[in-house]
Image: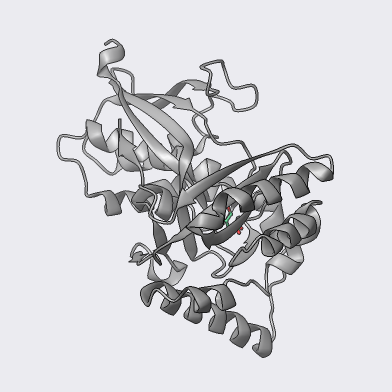
Amino acid sequence: MNDTDFVTAFAPASIGNLGVGFDMLGLAIAGTGDWVSARKSDASGVRIIEVQEMNGEVHPFLSTNADENTASIAAHSLWNATSNHCGLELIVRKGIPLQSGMGSSAASAVAAVVAVNALLDEPLPKSELLVHALAGEKFASGGLHADNVAPSLMGGLILCPQILLPDMIQLAVPEGVSSVLVHPELQVNTAESRRGLARGYSMDQWLTQQGYLAGFIAACEHNDIELLSRCLRDELIEPQRAASVPCFDEVKKAALKADALGCSLSGSGPSIFALCRDKSAPNLATAMEQACRKLGIECQSWISPLNAPGARVE
Ligand code: HSE
């Protein structure tokens, strides 16, 4: 076997949760993601040949232990579900920073299943790959939520409540709206962050957040930007997580001042996103970055359309 036996797939980063819709609403991001190359091997089982950084150097933190990487766990789940008897070899290339709240573990899992699917004699429809990518994501975050995996796989804005899985619903995106995602150079461990969340909520809190989610979905369907702005809120989870991202309050303040339609943590943070009208996006990104750097925290940002494409074979 040689390098030409490899199939390579790219999967984009994602924002999930999207402020409103904890664990059930996610958005694909253009401009950054992970790659996985896969080929059949004569040995049995799934093996990771190497995990690389963007520049092709060996990744300093991620191991090649196939039991500990979301890419190999997801690949294994898909391969096991088929009648292939040979093994698999993978090379993982990470474009997304670790523990960033940008769906890094989900993107590796998604890229892996898309690459492995292309090796099958009869590839599955993309939507049927979700359950296998979720097997990888579950290992990383300790919970069964598809709000990173689903948009990374399918692209755009996806509603994917756990209760409806493996079904997921592609939502319309309002015209003229972009996302801005800022990644402060900090790390938040998602599994730990999830363990710290309250288990019980009051009826008032439940009604409020349900209302925001319903309004947000209706706003997307009806292209109603004013309604979207009223509903892009998280009164349940954001208040519990904000303190773990030291620049969050200042960055959110700067975003709202620079015409953001709404702003919240991306996933468990530390990344912070805002939605805005297309024309406001460059200034908004600058304002959010400046607020972050003013606190001595280096950062990077991405501006993305709301209908960013999902994973693809390269
Ligand atoms: N919905 C998940 C959370 C996403 O907020 O914990 C984690 O990436």
Quarter occupied by the N terminus: top left
Judged from the image, the quadrant occupied by ligand 1 is: bottom right
Left or right of residue 262: residue 7: left
Does residue 56 sit above or below 129 in this rendering?
A: above
Q: Nearer the viewer, residue 288 or 241?
A: 288
Residue 217, quarter of the rendered image: bottom left
Residue 43, quarter of the rendered image: top left
Q: Nearer the viewer, residue 182 or 167?
A: 182
Identify the residue at the far top of this view.
2
Q: Residue 2, position in %: x, y?
A: 28, 10
Q: Residue 296, position in %: x, y?
A: 84, 39
Q: Residue at x 64, y 42 (%)?
A: 99
Any part of residue 107 in sight: yes
Does residue 64 sit above or below 132 in this rendering?
A: above
Q: Residue at x 39, y 64 (%)?
A: 175
Q: Residue 3, position in %: x, y?
A: 31, 13
Q: Residue 183, position in %: x, y?
A: 65, 44
Left or right of residue 255: residue 19: left
Identify the residue at the far left of this view.
122
Q: Residue at x 32, y 42 (%)?
A: 78
Q: Nearer the viewer, residue 225 or 189?
A: 225
